[in-house]
């Protein structure tokens, strides 16, 4: 006698359920890009103020404490209005830490050109990859594990480059971050489209951090290229 076997059958969702799912996804996309736009403008304003006032960089330790502390708080309050306020606190803080870095490059020969090229490259990469993910609706969830390991390794290598003052390693890390952040933009955009990320606050933070790291990495690579001309 053949034993009875249970099988998982994928039944199509009712039309109403599919419609609600699509509407929810579109709402997350709309809210994410709206909040992302506002936080980018806010971070740019704080960075510009930091440059104008010639504020000093808070240092590596305070930067890491501020970043991870605010990130922890955002994760905890991601479903409340306080979470949105904390996103502005995080992005404003990151904009402030960016100011002294931009000031440094502006003080170098062709510094203005370097900063402009880094901004243009960051915008082109982000818009291109986001547009590709949104238009093709491809699933990039398979990149999750690779990105997690890659970002962790690159982060630790970056700390080693700072503490041991190894310029070659620092440039290698910057190049790696350009690739990793590009992958993260694809991954997170795909994650939103396919319902893997339903919280627009966390989606905004992920995309903002990707853009921030992409810009600073391009800035370092372009700064070296221009200085060697």
Image (cartoon, rainbow, N blue to C red):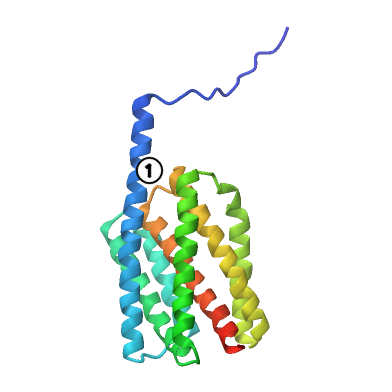
Answer whether residue 22 is visible to the viewer in this image: yes
Image position of 45 (left or right of 157): left
Residue at coordinates 53% horizontally, 59% vertically from top-left? 184
Element on which disc 1 rests:
helix
Q: Is residue 203 above or below residue 120?
A: above
Q: Position of residue 126 (x, y in %)?
A: 47, 61
Quarter of the figure with residue 23? top left
> In what quadrant of the picture does the C terminus appear?
bottom right
Residue at coordinates 66% horizontally, 80% vertically from top-left? 169
| Closest to the observer, 30 or 229 | 229
Answer whether residue 196 is visible to the viewer in this image: no
Q: Which residue is mark 1?
A: 25
* View extreme (right): residue: 1
* View extreme (front): residue: 229
Q: Position of residue 214 (x, y in %)?
A: 51, 69
| Closest to the observer, 62 or 176 | 176
Residue at coordinates 49% horizontally, 70% vertically from top-left? 121
Image position of 227 (left or right of 35): right
Q: Position of residue 208 (x, y in %)?
A: 42, 65
| Closest to the observer, 40 or 227 | 227
Residue at coordinates 64% horizontally, 85% vertically from top-left? 167
> In what quadrant of the picture does the N terminus appear?
top right
Q: Is residue 217 above or below residue 5?
A: below
Q: Position of residue 26 (x, y in %)?
A: 35, 44
Within 10 Å of disc 1 (Cα), the crowding (few <14, some 14-19, many 20+) is: many
Q: Is residue 20 above or below residue 205?
A: above
């Amino acid at each position: 006698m053949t034993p009875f076997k249970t099988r998982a059958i994928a039944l199509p969702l009712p039309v109403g359920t599919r419609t609600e799912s699509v509407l929810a996804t579109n709402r997350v996309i709309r809210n994410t890009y709206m909040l992302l736009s506002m936080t980018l403008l806010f971070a740019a304003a704080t960075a510009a103020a930091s440059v104008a006032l010639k504020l000093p960089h808070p240092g590596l330790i305070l930067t890491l404490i501020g970043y991870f502390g605010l990130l922890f708080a955002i994760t905890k309050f991601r479903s409340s209005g306080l979470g949105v306020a904390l996103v502005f606190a995080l992005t404003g803080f990151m904009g402030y830490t960016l100011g002294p870095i931009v000031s440094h490059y502006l003080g170098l020969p062709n510094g203005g050109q370097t900063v402009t090229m880094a901004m243009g490259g960051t915008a082109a990469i982000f818009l291109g990859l986001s547009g590709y993910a949104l238009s093709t609706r491809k699933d990039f969830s398979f990149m999750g594990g690779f990105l997690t390991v890659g970002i962790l390794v690159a982060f630790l290598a970056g700390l080693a480059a700072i503490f041991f003052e190894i310029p070659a390693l620092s440039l290698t890390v910057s190049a790696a971050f350009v690739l990793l952040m590009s992958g993260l933009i694809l991954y997170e955009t795909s994650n939103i489209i396919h319902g893997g990320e339903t919280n627009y606050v966390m989606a905004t933070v992920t995309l903002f951090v990707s853009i921030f790291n992409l810009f600073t990495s391009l800035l370092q690579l372009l700064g070296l290229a221009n200085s060697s001309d």
